[in-house]
Structures are given as C-alpha cells and as structure tokens.
Amino acid sequence: MLKWALIFAIVAVVAALLGFGGIAGAAAGIAKFLFIVAVIGFLIFLALGVFAGRKITGR
C-alpha cells in the first residue's frame, strides 16, 4: 500500500513540475488517502499482534 502511495506522490510531483495542476492535485489526494489507509492498517495489525501475543504468553 505504501508503495502505491509513493508512486502517486512521485506522479504528483512530476505532474506539478510539468504544469498539470489537475492531475497533480488528484494524484496527491490519492497518495494521501493510500498513506492514511496504510497507517490505519498498520495500527490495527499492531494492536492485534499485541493482544494475540499477550494471549499466547499468558500475561
């Protein structure tokens, strides 16, 4: 997911440098959305890992 966010961010920067404002804005919005989804997914899996680890170790 972060790979696609980085790709869209690079596309946004290149499009902005070439003067394509609409495409740059859209690509930046998609990159921001993908980054937020990746962070939320990371936090969910981190919480699941912590809680599952506590069940396995019995603490």
Image (cartoon, rainbow, N blue to C red):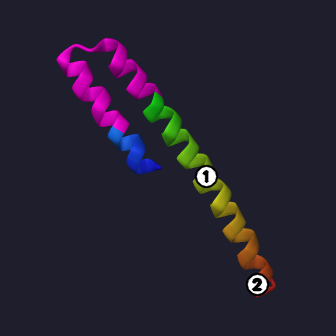
The span shown in magenta is 8-29
| Position of 51 relative to 4 (above/below) | below
Left or right of residue 53: residue 3? left
**Quarter of the image holding residue 24?**
top left
The residue under the point 61% across, 52% down is 41
Mark 1 falls on what kind of element? helix
Task: Please name the residue that numbered disc 1 is placed on.
Answer: 41
Q: Position of residue 18 (x, y in %)?
A: 18, 18
User: 18 or 50, which is in the foreground?
Assistant: 18
Q: Is residue 11 magenta?
A: yes
Magenta region, main secondary structure = helix
| Position of 36 relative to 15 (above/below) | below
Q: Quick one: label 1 or label 2, which is nearer the N terminus?
A: 1
Task: Please name the residue that numbered disc 2 is placed on.
Answer: 56
So how many labels did they put on this image?
Answer: 2
Mark 2 falls on what kind of element? helix
Kind of residue at badge 1: Gly
Left or right of residue 37: residue 30? left
Kind of residue at badge 2: Ile
